Each structure stands twice: as C-alpha cells, then as structure tokens.
Amino acid sequence: NDAPDDDNIDKNMDTPENNDGSAKIRIPWCLTTPMTAVQPYIYNYIRLALACGPIHVANSIFHRALQTWLVYLEPWNYVMKKRILPSSNGMRGSAPPPTNRAGEFWRNAAATVASSQRYELYPSYVAPRPHSKSAYTLQWEAYVASNLHLYTVPLSIFLKRAREFDFSSNNDHTRSLALVQRVLRIYNKPLVDVINKIVNKKADAVTQTLIARHEENLGVYSPPNDWKLSSCQGDAIILLEEIFMQHRKRLSEMDIIDRWGEKIDILFSGNAV
C-alpha cells in the first residue's frame, strides 16, 4: 500500500506570510482541506461517544463511533475500484478490470477514458478481519502525526470501557473479544514505535511541525501534551485479566456440564452402579 505521494502533499502545503508580507517556510500537510475541516469534530464525536455511549445496545452511538474510529485509523485499507459511467447514449459498457490497493485514496474520484468506455475511480473500504495483521508501514508516519490524538486518546477511553463488555456468555464472549482484537491489531510494533517517538518528543522537525498543526486544528479539543502510551498499560492489563478470568470460568462451567452429562449417560444407559 502506498502513502500519499509528494505531489499530493505539496498541494496541501500552507504558505503563510510574515508581518512584512514575505513568505514563511512552507509547512507540509498531508490532509485534504475537507479532512482538515472535519478533523476536530470527528475527534470530539469519537471521544465523547466512546466515553458515554451505551455498550450493550446494538448499533448504539458507541458502536457507530467505534466503527468510524477504526476506519479513520487505517486509511491504507481503502481499495480504489472502478465503476462504469453511462455513455452519451445512456448505455453502460462491459465490467472494468479489477484494481489493486492504491494510495490514490487521497485523490478525488477521477473519470478515465479507455477505448469507448468511461470509468470512475472511487475509494472502497475493505474491513480487516480481527486476527489479520495491520498493514501500516512507515510511509504513513505523516498521517499518524497529523492525527496523533485520534490514535491515543480514543485508545485510552476504549481500554477503560471495554471492561464493560460481556465476556461471560458464549455468544457475547466471541463478539466482545472480536471488538477488542479489531482495535489492538491496529497497533503493531512500527505504529507503536512511531507514536512513542512522537509523544516522547524524539520526532524530527517536520513531524513536530505536523503535530503542532494538528493540535492547532483541534483547538479547544486538543488534550494535554503529557500523555504517554504507557499510560494505557494498566487498563490493558486489567482488560486482559478480565478476559482471561471469564475464559477460565467458562471452561470450568463447561467441565461441570460435561461431568453431569457423563452421569446422565451412565444413569440412563443402565450401567449405573
């Protein structure tokens, strides 16, 4: 998967002016103008919905915000697809060939002409499986820096709220565990290393500029700067202990049922002593 190329980043560079009218150093910014405009509102929506939304209600604001957050964190899971545009006579042509995953997610859907056919490119999100590995690479570091607090604050909130999931019953245990896995799978080692480098103030000057722009864009929603990824460790350990405890309890209950089942089989098979 490809991250946004340099040409696309150049289109979103700001060129502010000094008081005397001279141009300052150009600041790279990998988000489009619409994404920049909605970023603070998406962040606040996800933050509040994860913190206050009902967990045990299907399709509640909590689960809708969770899905929005997961999609936002992994733009590299988008696939560029083609659809046929109506021709001048209102007819559609044959199906277009399949396309590969591409970094053109950041480009607007573009119409192309091949032979007599006209196709439109559009991004389509491919939801990863809970057990699949994250496709994050260091090419997306600028995107992470430009959305840093969307990778950190909602994670801290989620780990606290996830302890409210039902891990006791068979059906709910599977569904709850899948939700936890869908979140944790995103944070592979390369991504965690980048986040730690940023929050520990070890990022390069360009990355620090992106973070400053990100925090300025969040405005009043921007959180304190003393947050560390290690702050989530305690909540993560408590959550995993809860999952493990409920898993052991379920196994114990299954053993009891199996033993009673054996006794019933013996009783009605005529082999009782």
Image (cartoon, rainbow, N blue to C red):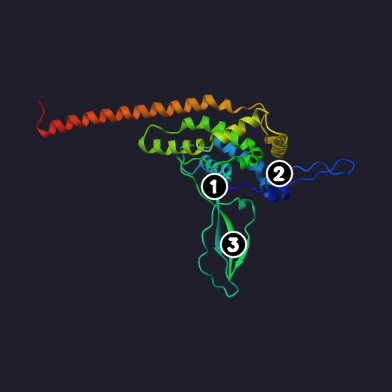
Of callouts 3 and 1, the N-terminal one: 1
Task: Indicate whether 37 appears above or below 200.
Answer: below
User: Answer yes or no: do the residues labelled 3 and 1 have beta carbons within 8 Å?
Assistant: no
Picture residue at 44% right of the left edge, 25% below the top = 241
Of callouts 1 and 2, the N-terminal one: 2
List x then y, in percent, for residue 71.
Answer: 55, 45
Figure label count: 3
Picture residue at 64% right of the left edge, 30% below the top = 197
Residue extending farthest to the bottom is: 89
SS for callout 1:
helix
Task: Specify the label residue 195 is tagged with.
Answer: none
- Is residue 117 left or right of 262 when viewed as pictured? right
- Is residue 206 left or right of 132 when viewed as pictured? right
Disc 3 packing (10 Å; few <14; some 14–19; many ≥20) = some
Marks 2/3: CA–CA distance: 27 Å
Residue 163 in view here: yes
Residue 51 in view here: no
The part of the image, by quadrant, that contains residue 191 is top right
Three-letter code, disc 1:
Asn
Three-letter code, disc 2:
Trp
SS for callout 3:
strand
> For mark 2, what is the residue?
29
Task: Specify the label residue 120 is tagged with.
Answer: 3
User: Answer yes or no: do the residues labelled 2 and 3 have beta carbons within 8 Å?
Assistant: no
Three-letter code, disc 3:
Glu
Marks 1/2: CA–CA distance: 21 Å
Residue extending farthest to the right is: 20
List x then y, in percent, for residue 87.
Answer: 58, 71
Of callouts 2 and 3, the N-terminal one: 2
> For mark 1, what is the residue?
77
List x then y, in percent, for residue 93.
Answer: 53, 70
